[in-house]
């Protein structure tokens, strides 16, 4: 069907830019800094009232890193890295938000952001070969480049149940938590969702509420978090590793400091068990991301490691009914094919007399009624507060909720509604001069220490724009063939793994109507992706067309 080019003639631009950056999180802050350094007239736009991105919006009880703090940092500047010291191995949200303010001020980019402003529409004008961008406040911006740093988990699934507006209590989505906090004292609280976020909330508030009802649909494999405090000795230790970390973490599988060390088939069964026990005791994500890589490809390896993790969880729960609700069943899905959360006392929370686990896999939530939550069998749980830890439209949602129009008036929401595609997770064919981070088909879409991947992508984008300036180009767009080759490469790797055979938000299965035939994240590894991206640049950007 032929599309009509949107008429933008009536939209008179009030702001002229060379680059507009959407988002003031880890990617947006660094991207604005780099483009300023490149000499471009750039401005960042942020829906929130301040910098922070994920760490501005997600201030729910228990929110914290599950990447080690000294890894979740910028590594392009030694003084910036050493100028901040974490108080714990896995710091909590208030400290993380303070760190975001620290880097913003050190990089002197706070004045380059416009806050409390949401991008509503962006249209590529083929006559001027520039983007016309409209904000929710009515500002119209004319910009050469549109750079999206809107985040991979920033479009919450909040309006999921009939009757939410009729609830007489309070409903909070974890990613839109009020800055003033929520008083749970003496309240009957229901939590919907037991993914990474729900787990953090549940283990944190269980002791504070009068009653806690946890509605459980999908059990999780988890790992215990060990979170020691960091004092001067520990801070000096990791500060002294700056050069080592800068050289290692961009090239590992996951963008962490650790990587695959143990070949499954060359290791005896006894030694495998010893290794699993040793890594499990590390209290980090290492068992998932640096134990036996064969678990992602070979069903028998996945089964054995999954059984090991189930054994650990069941030993803590003991209660058969809780085990049935909270532990994945054999053959359901393998450890590591879903996002693996870290937890601290999560299972023990269910042993408290004021906490009730409610299975909704076979008896789903049907609606929110004025007094609480109603299930399919007609039972109603009366509540004062409902916490929605219901996840996100991952990878795509941040951009499909903006009306983005490319060549010929084509809609990004419509295009991705049919098939989710990109070139390197950095551009999309049909959308010239739109550069992207944390979208599908790159590790930053789901499977990466985010600062590692977002630094790499923003640096790649900056180098591309510098290349264009040096060669006198005004427009860049991936070719149709170049994009198809990347999609095929991505799929060949993803489809060889057990991740592609598992229903989860990793392939969009949590969002009704979202295409689920493609794994959102590039699963070939952070280091391998970097090699591919560098090769594309060093080879003269052959997958791209310039004007």
Image: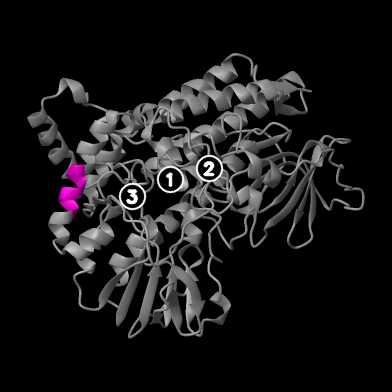
- Label of residue 546 in the image: none
**Do the CB atoms of the residues marked 2 and 1 lie less than 8 Å apart?**
yes
The structure residue drawn at horizontal position 29% and vertical position 29%, both measured from the top left corner, is 298
How many angstroms separate mark 3 from mark 2 (CA)?
A: 27 Å
Q: Residue at x 23, y 68 (%)?
A: 349
Vertical arrangement, residue 287 with respect to residue 198, above or below: above
Coloured how?
one colour
Q: Residues within 10 Å of mark 3 (few under 14, many from 20)?
A: many
Count residues near mark 2 (Cα–Cα under 10 Å), then give few for <14, some for 14-19, many for 20+. Answer: many
Instruction: Kindly identify which residue carries mark 3.
Output: 66
Give the residue pinned by disc 2: 516
Residues under labels 3 and 1: Cα distance? 23 Å
Mark 3 in CB contact with mark 2 (< 8 angstroms): no
Q: Which residues are magenta?
A: 307-313
- The correct choice, above or below, for 300 with respect to 451 in the image is above
Spatial CA distance of label 2 from label 1 is 8 Å
> Residue at 25% of width from left, 42% of height from top?
236
Prevalent SS, magenta region? helix
Residue 271, position as x, y percentages in the image: 10, 29
Q: Among all residues in the image, which is located at the extreme top?
A: 539
Residue 503 disc label: 1
């Amino acid at each position: 069907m032929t599309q009509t080019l949107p008429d933008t003639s009536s939209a008179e631009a009030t702001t002229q830019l060379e680059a507009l950056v959407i988002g003031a999180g880890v990617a947006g802050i660094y991207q604005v800094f780099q483009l300023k350094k490149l000499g471009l007239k750039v401005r960042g736009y942020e829906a929130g009232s301040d910098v922070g991105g994920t760490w501005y919006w997600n201030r729910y009880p228990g929110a914290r890193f599950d990447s080690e703090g000294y890894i979740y940092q910028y590594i392009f500047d030694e003084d910036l890295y050493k100028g901040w010291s974490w108080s714990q191995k896995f710091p909590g949200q208030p400290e993380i938000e303070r760190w975001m303010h620290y880097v913003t001020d050190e990089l002197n980019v706070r004045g380059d952001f416009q806050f409390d402003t949401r991008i509503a529409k962006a249209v590529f004008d083929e006559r001027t070969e520039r983007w016309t961008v409209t904000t929710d406040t009515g500002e119209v911006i004319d910009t050469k480049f549109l750079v999206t740093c809107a985040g991979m988990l920033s479009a919450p699934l909040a309006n999921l149940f009939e009757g939410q507006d009729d609830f007489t209590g309070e409903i909070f989505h974890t990613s839109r938590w009020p800055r003033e906090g929520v008083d749970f004292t003496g309240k009957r609280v229901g939590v919907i969702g037991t993914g990474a976020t729900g787990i953090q909330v549940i283990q944190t508030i269980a002791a504070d509420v009068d009653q806690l009802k946890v509605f459980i649909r999908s059990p999780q494999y988890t790992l215990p978090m060990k979170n020691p405090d960091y004092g001067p000795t520990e801070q000096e230790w990791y500060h002294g590793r700056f050069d080592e970390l800068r050289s290692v973490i961009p090239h590992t599988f996951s963008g962490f400091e650790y990587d695959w060390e143990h070949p499954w088939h060359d290791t005896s069964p006894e030694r495998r068990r010893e290794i699993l026990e040793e890594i499990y005791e590390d209290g980090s994500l290492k068992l998932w991301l640096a134990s036996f890589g064969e678990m992602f490809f070979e069903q028998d390896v996945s089964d054995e490691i999954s059984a090991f993790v189930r054994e650990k969880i069941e030993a803590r729960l003991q209660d058969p009914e809780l085990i049935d609700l909270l532990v994945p069943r054999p053959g359901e899905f393998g450890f590591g094919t879903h996002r693996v959360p870290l937890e601290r006392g999560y299972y023990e929370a269910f042993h408290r007399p004021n906490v009730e686990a409610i299975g909704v896999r076979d008896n789903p939530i049907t609606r929110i009624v004025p007094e609480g939550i109603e299930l399919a069998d007609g039972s109603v749980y009366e509540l004062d507060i409902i916490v929605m830890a219901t996840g996100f439209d991952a990878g795509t949602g941040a951009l499909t909720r903006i009306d983005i129009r490319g060549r010929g008036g084509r809609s990004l929401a419509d295009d991705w509604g049919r098939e989710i595609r990109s070139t390197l997770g950095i551009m999309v064919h049909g959308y010239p001069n739109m550069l992207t981070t944390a979208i599908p088909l790159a590790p930053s879409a789901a499977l990466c220490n985010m600062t590692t991947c977002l630094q790499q992508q923003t640096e790649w984008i900056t180098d591309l724009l510098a290349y264009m300036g040096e060669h006198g180009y005004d427009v860049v767009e991936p070719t149709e063939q170049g994009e198809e080759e990347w999609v095929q490469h991505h799929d060949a790797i993803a489809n060889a793994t057990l991740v592609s055979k598992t229903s989860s938000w990793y392939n969009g299965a949590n969002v009704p109507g979202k295409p689920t035939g493609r794994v959102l994240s590039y699963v070939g590894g952070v280091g391998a992706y970097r090699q591919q991206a560098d090769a594309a640049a060093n080879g003269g950007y052959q997958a791209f067309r310039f004007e």
